[in-house]
Image (cartoon, helix red, strand yellow):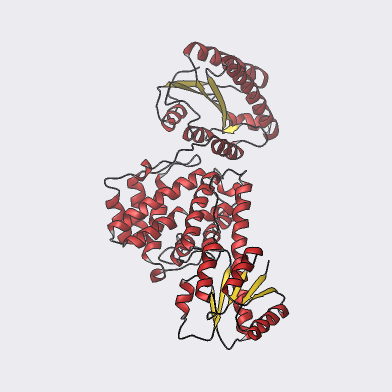
């Protein structure tokens, strides 16, 4: 709606303004003074009020105060010939949106109204964008973003936006959310050690919390990919700093937020992205975040990669500093920060059931083989991270089928037939596992995974039940050898509760443990 109320005690001026606005296509009404304007505002909705300042009964400043209190969504454009009495800053501070001096310039009036309505359109666009994001997530976001109009406090809008984006990021990808929280704390501690003022520390922390917000636009096929990126994957992923920065460039009054988001992957030698900035073009805040971002990514474990140690990560950063890619002083301060503190102690558990269900479903798509339906064994890491496994509560067993001479089997049977046979064996083992789980009625659990032509079982149950399961598995493997001459030497091992899953898998794959 573009409806305008013109308020001026001079009838001639009032009518002239109405005619100008009508010619521009606006729907207009007129009032002779502030009190008459108040009555009009009570009975109709207006987008903009254009008012004179010196009027009888209720002047322009009093009308501004009334509109600010009772109609905060209405923009006020002030027109006056008394620039010595009513200065621009006082009018803006009182709630005015803009200021025009008499004699009235038609072009100036038109331009300022266009600006006001353009800002309204941008705000409505942001509201729709956030609403669509929330609906796309199945209305999972509990926070409701209160979008202020142009003359409301910008800080309230930004605070609500941060809260919503944090929740959005958590629902979209929990690991990226946890990464952001850790990078924020690492960066803040580095900044404190460097003696940055509190205001910059707040900017630093706030920017870090949303530095990867642009990943909401990255397709799941890339964002959640449990393997190495190819060149096209990398090109798509490298768009996320620009997407995130654009979200904040339009709305945040502090450009440092958008600058950090856009450039946290830049390097001092110009080898980073998206703009290849170098040296002094990158301020201290970006230099801090880029180091914190790399360190957390190296030491944090993901379902698709192993972490490296703190010392190894710091060695890599020292090398990057010597090559002139990251800030040497920031790396040195990071070492000091890490002496008595480990950022991996920061964990954000998934507490809402629906978030857990979404996360599990998303990951399944990347660990499940499309033609067979079997999950890659690395899916175990994700199940462990989300506490689906109960290895911390009771012992567990691992069993590997250990097919012998797979390469000879493929040469003898051919690629297509070999795959079909292995799939058939896997399906038989899967049926055994399903029957085992059904008998237990939730008291025990077994899961089967694929691994480079072999199969891996993860089992939580009592010893007697375990022995029978392994007997059934061995019987099917012996049948497979009789039918297709594919020999196996299955082996298994039991691990005590709380044993590291990575340690257990490494020991099993080295062949340590008894034969099933």
In the image: residue 469, left or right of residue 287: right
With respect to residue 128, does 480 lie above or below?
above
Q: Residue 506 at x, y = what percent?
A: 44, 31
Identified at 60% across, 81% down, the residue is 9
Q: Residue 435 at x, y = what percent?
A: 62, 17
With respect to residue 397, does 131 lie above or below?
below
Instruction: Give the camera-side residue of 113 and 187.
Output: 113
With respect to residue 510, does 22 lie above or below?
below
Q: Of all residues shown, which one is farthest toward the front?
A: 57
Q: Quadrant of the N terminus?
A: bottom right
Q: Of all residues shown, which one is farthest toward the bottom?
A: 103
Instruction: Give the camera-side residue of 287 and 317.
Output: 287
Q: Residue 403 at x, y = what percent?
A: 56, 25
Instruction: Give the camera-side residue of 384 and 23.
Output: 23
Instruction: Give the camera-side residue of 340 and 249.
Output: 249
Q: How many marks?
A: 0
In the image: residue 378, left or right of residue 183: right
In the image: residue 74, left or right of residue 342: right
Q: Can I make out residue 151 in this image?
A: no
Q: Quadrant of residue 359?
A: top right
Q: Residue 51 at x, y = what percent?
A: 58, 77
In the image: residue 343, left or right of residue 51: left
With respect to residue 214, does 513 lie above or below?
above
Q: Can I make out residue 388 in this image?
A: yes
């Amino acid at each position: 709606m573009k409806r305008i109320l013109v308020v001026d005690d001079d009838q001639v001026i009032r009518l002239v303004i109405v005619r100008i606005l009508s010619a521009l296509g606006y729907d207009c009404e007129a009032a002779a003074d502030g009190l008459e304007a108040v009555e009009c505002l009570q009975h109709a909705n207006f987008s903009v009020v254009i008012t004179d300042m010196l009027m009888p009964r209720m002047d322009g400043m009093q009308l501004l105060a009334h509109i600010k209190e009772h109609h905060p969504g209405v923009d006020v454009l002030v027109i006056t010939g008394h620039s010595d009495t009513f200065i621009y800053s006082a009018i803006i501070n009182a709630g005015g949106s803009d200021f025009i001096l008499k004699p009235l310039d038609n072009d100036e009036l038109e331009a300022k109204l266009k600006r006001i309505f353009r800002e309204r359109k941008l705000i409505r666009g942001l509201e729709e964008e956030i609403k669509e994001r929330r609906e796309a997530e199945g209305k999972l976001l509990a926070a409701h973003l209160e979008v202020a109009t142009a003359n409301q406090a910008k800080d309230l809008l930004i605070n609500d936006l941060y809260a919503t984006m944090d929740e959005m990021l958590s629902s979209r990808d929990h690991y990226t959310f946890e990464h952001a929280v850790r990078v924020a704390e690492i960066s803040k501690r580095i900044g404190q050690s460097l003696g940055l003022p509190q205001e910059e520390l707040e900017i630093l922390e706030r920017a870090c919390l949303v530095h990867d917000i642009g990943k909401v636009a990255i397709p799941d096929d890339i964002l959640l990919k449990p393997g190495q990126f190819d060149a096209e994957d990398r090109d798509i992923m490298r768009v996320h700093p620009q997407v995130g920065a654009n979200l904040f460039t339009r709305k945040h009054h502090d450009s440092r937020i958008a600058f950090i988001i856009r450039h946290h992957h830049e390097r001092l030698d110009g080898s980073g992205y998206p703009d290849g900035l170098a040296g002094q073009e990158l301020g201290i805040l970006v230099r801090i975040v880029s180091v914190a971002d790399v360190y957390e990514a190296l030491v944090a474990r993901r379902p698709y990669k192993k972490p490296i140690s703190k010392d190894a990560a710091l060695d890599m950063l020292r090398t990057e500093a010597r090559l002139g890619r990251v800030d040497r002083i920031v790396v040195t301060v990071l070492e000091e920060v890490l002496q008595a503190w480990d950022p991996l102690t920061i964990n954000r558990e998934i507490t809402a059931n629906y978030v857990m269900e979404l996360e599990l479903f998303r990951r399944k798509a990347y660990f499940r083989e499309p033609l067979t339906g079997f999950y890659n064994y690395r899916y175990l890491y994700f199940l462990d991270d989300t506490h689906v496994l109960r290895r911390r509560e009771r012992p567990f067993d691992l069993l590997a089928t250990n097919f012998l001479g797979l390469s000879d089997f493929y040469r003898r049977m051919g690629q297509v037939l070999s795959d079909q046979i292995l799939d058939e064996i896997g399906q038989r083992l899967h049926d055994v596992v399903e029957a085992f789980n059904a008998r237990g009625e939730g008291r025990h659990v077994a899961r089967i995974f694929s691994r480079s032509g072999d199969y891996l079982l993860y089992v939580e149950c009592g010893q007697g039940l375990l022995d029978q399961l392994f007997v059934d598995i061995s019987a099917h493997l012996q049948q497979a050898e009789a039918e297709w001459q594919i020999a196996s030497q299955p082996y298994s091992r039991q691990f005590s509760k709380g044993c590291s899953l990575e340690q257990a898998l490494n020991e099993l794959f080295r062949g340590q443990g008894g034969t099933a």
